[in-house]
Amino acid sequence: MKINVKAKLKSEFKTKLKKNDDVVVISGSSKGKRGRLLHIDRSAGLVLVEGVNKKHKAVKPSQENQKGGIFQKEYPVQASNVMFFCDKCKKGVKLQIDSAGKEKARKCSKCGKSIDK
């Protein structure tokens, strides 16, 4: 019996979140913080949230950055540590896929509010 190792390595993290969604962090040092989703790295299972998990980064002076110095930069968090923030429910919720008709749309699992317009 042969096992296809390459197929297991190429598996991507599946999520119903999309870029520019409002999310809330549900665990970790940034628990409770809200922000906008800037980037999703499906191969590593990481997301970049605006204003969350900021760290200081020391930058040397270069041609692009004449001064250099210490800057704050946002670092990614695990995708499993964030949930979609529903404006109607005012909390983090799971999303459902509503396949009414030909198009698929996301909706809140608590109140049923449609996310995609």
Image (cartoon, rainbow, N blue to C red):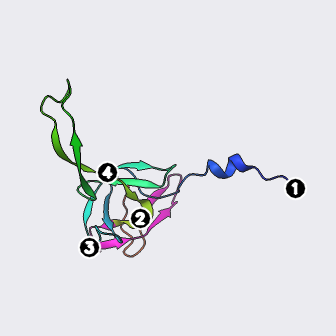
Q: Secondary structure at mark 1?
A: loop
Q: Is residue 5 left or right of residue 94?
A: right
Q: Name the amino acid, label 4.
A: Asn
Q: Which quadrant: the C terminus?
A: bottom left
Q: Residues within 10 Å of mark 2 (few under 14, many from 20)?
A: some
Q: Which mark is residue 1?
A: 1
Q: Which residue is mark 3?
A: 90
- Circle nearer the N terminus (3, 2): 3
**Label 3 vs label 4: CA separation?**
18 Å
- The structure residue drawn at horizontal position 33% and vertical position 56%, both measured from the top left corner, is 21
Say if mark 3 contacts mark 2, CB within 8 Å: no
Q: Is residue 47 left or right of residue 62?
A: right
- For marks 1 and 4, give the one nearer the viewer: 1
Q: Secondary structure at mark 4?
A: loop
Q: Which mark is residue 20?
A: 4
- For marks 3 and 2, give the one nearer the viewer: 3
Q: Which residue is mark 2?
A: 107
**Label 1 vs label 4: CA separation?**
45 Å
Q: Is residue 95 magenta?
A: yes
**Label 2 vs label 4: CA separation?**
16 Å
Q: Name the amino acid, label 1.
A: Met
- For marks 2 and 1, give the one nearer the viewer: 1
Q: Position of residue 25 (x, y in %)?
A: 32, 67
